Image: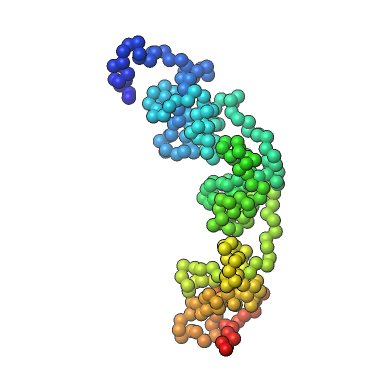
Amino acid sequence: QTTGTCISNLAINLQPSGAPTFDNDGVGGLDLWVPVWPNTNSYESGYCSNKKEFVYKAYTQPIDSHIECCINWFSMQISGFCISEVEGALQPSSSPSITGGGRPNAKFFPRFGVGNPPATENYCDNDHRVLPQWQLENYDSMGFDTQEECCESWFPELRTACTRRQPTFGTLPPAPTDCGFYPKHGQSWDTGTCVNDCDNPPEYENLSNLIFSDDQAGGIECCNTWFENNGLTTQQIGSGRLSYCLQQMVAANPTFTLSAPPTRAPVS
């Protein structure tokens, strides 16, 4: 309330002092801190202030410490903007004692739509220097020893988009070279393909009609099982043209020599 009408109606001995206690940083702020969101209303640019105009108008209970206010309200801030505004001597160490920090065996943590440069995807990385406070404080209990473990726990739907992403520290393990073909559905059945990119959904591993051998025969069997003659008109079927699935398989595997659609063995 900018008028202070409500406070002015209190008994004089209950009204707040006209000279409230200030902190010792010389900026004229109160000993109380409240969260502030800029006009953009962005969590990442939020901070804590002890300015009277914010404290008096706050809708939250003020907090006695600047850093406690940041941790309470902005501990998940990726930018760390609030903490960065805390007086230097009160900030948490910028080089926390972390087992494996900055080395190839540093622990992996989930990263939610952030990156350097900024990214939109979720992924797992092992750069402790950009972790928010809440993850630093739980480094050993929340961190994963491998990228794969982190991805499977947090982003299983991303599969190799997460597990094959280059980490900040260390290198990716060699990619598997003997992954079988599996059906990959497009926007329609006519654009379905069979691929052997080692990115099949984990549940496919337990179903015999979803994973085929990694050679040309396996690719053909996959296409004929799931997408036989897809992409062809009725007139084109039997004309010697490859289905869309077989065309894509050959294009992705230059060593394959298929030039005409295979024939199925007669059904007895």
The quadrant of the picture occupied by the N terminus is: top left
Name the image quarter holding residue 40. Answer: top left
Residue shown at the point (64%, 73%) measured from the top left = 213
> Is residue 182 visible to the viewer in this orientation of the structure?
no
Name the image quarter holding residue 245. Answer: bottom right
- Determine whether, in the image, residue 212 is placed left or right of residue 226: right
Residue shown at the point (56%, 25%) measured from the top left = 87
Residue 10, compared with residue 175, is above or below; it is: above
Residue 168, horizontal then vertical, whole percent: 65, 47
Tally of numbered tags: 0
Which one is in front, 170 or 60? 60
> Is residue 160 visible to the viewer in this orientation of the structure?
yes
Residue shown at the point (49%, 23%) measured from the top left = 64
Which one is in front, 177 or 226? 226
Residue shown at the point (70%, 43%) measured from the top left = 103
- Determine whether, in the image, residue 18 is placed left or right of residue 171: left
Which one is in front, 59 or 254? 59
- Determine whether, in the image, residue 72 is placed left or right of residue 103: left
Residue 13, horizontal then vertical, whole percent: 35, 10
Name the image quarter holding residue 202. Answer: bottom right
